[in-house]
Amino acid sequence: MKEHIQAFETKAVSLLPTWTNNGLDKEEKTRETVTLQESTALRSQPGHSTFSELHFTYRRTYIALYVAFLLACNVVIPCLLFYLLEEFTKMGPKTLIGISSAALGLSSCFDSPVRLFRLVKHRRVYGPLGSDVWWHLDFSMWTYTFALLVFAIPLAIAPAIPLFNFFLMSTVMLVGPMGLVFFISLFRPKLPLRCSSDRRGEPMKPAVFYVIEDVASVDFKHGRDFRRAFHDRWNSSPPFQRLMYHLTIYWTVSSIIYCGVTAAISWGTPLRFAFGWVLGQLFVWAGVSALGCRLIAKKGLSDEHDWWSRERSRQMEQVRTSESV
């Protein structure tokens, strides 16, 4: 961290204007030295925080392939089975729903075990901070597992009742529980159990914080170094805390809208139309919501950058004042 700050200061100093006059050049060099001395003194002051940079990288090809895999398992294959079998066979709705639903959730049979394997087998590399107990999984793993269990209820029950509109509510059963957890996190309750890297009894952070920490550390393989840097950023930056809070509100509201729209389509339109629409709508909603999330995040990070600039100037002014006294 110190090396990063010093590199930033050196780069900032190099961007200062260069004067041809030797006297002014000496004055600038003296000013640069004073600035570096002030910065060193600032870092040594107790109570003064420093910016924690997050090193996050990803491959677009990896994301594109994973999204294509999700679309194939949860939209393309179920729709092909449903509409082709409806068109060329005499199967009833109960049989069509039963066959088509077999492909739903197929992707979870691959990504969830892989993620669980990383958390358990390579606990000290990817697992939450502060615990090496294998069953102390992270927030995202527990929340996703809970949502999948609820998601399976209409898939198992609806074809047997038969209540086909209830089957179409399966995606609501996936998004709804996660939205509920996001909503609860906004009130910062004390944690009854460990939650990712937070210990029992600590106030719960906004759910988006845990999702970013877990997904970046495990799914994108940035490991515990990212978890440490992410918690340092939270502890040192009030604007960053506000950003996590705003993003959690955003995804909570977005989840409510999705559940409402999906319920209206599921119960208010014919099965032949609703089947394909509801499955495709999940990915449309996710894409549009992700775009809005990106815009909010960019604005929040820009505000945080401005805050850090003001905070740095204020702290350096305090150092000047204390040294002059």
Image (tube, helix red, strand yellow):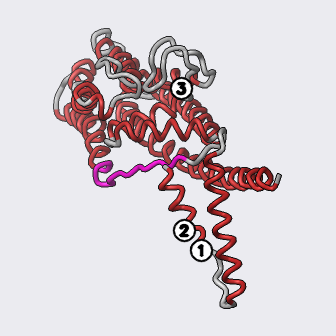
Q: The residue under label 2 is which amino acid type? A: Lys
Pinpoint residue 157: horizontal percent, then vertical percent.
Answer: 31, 11
Residue position marked by numbered label 1 in the rendering: 15
Check residue 11 in the rendering and tell me which mark sits there, or answer none. 2
Q: Residue at x 55, y 46 (%)?
A: 292
Magenta stretch secondary structure, dominant: loop
Who is closer to the viewer here, 60 or 276? 60
Give the spatial CA distance, label 1 vs label 3. 44 Å
Secondary structure of residue under mark 2: helix
Secondary structure of residue under mark 3: helix
Check residue 182 in the rendering and tell me which mark sits there, or answer none. 3
Q: Is residue 302 magenta?
A: no
Q: Residue at x 68, y 73 (%)?
A: 30
Marks 3 and 2, the one that precedes in the sequence: 2
Residue 167 visible (yes or no): no
Mark 3 neighbour class, 10 Å CA radius: few under 14, some 14 to 19, many 20 or more:
many
Who is closer to the viewer here, 122 or 242? 122
Residue 156 visible (yes or no): yes
Q: The residue under label 1 is which amino acid type? A: Leu
Which residues make up the magenta segment? 52-64
Q: Is residue 56 magenta?
A: yes
Q: Are marks 1 and 3 in contact (CB under 8 Å)?
A: no
Q: Are marks 2 and 1 in contact (CB under 8 Å)?
A: yes
Pinpoint residue 183: horizontal percent, then vertical percent.
Answer: 57, 23
Pinpoint residue 290: horizontal percent, then vertical percent.
Answer: 48, 44
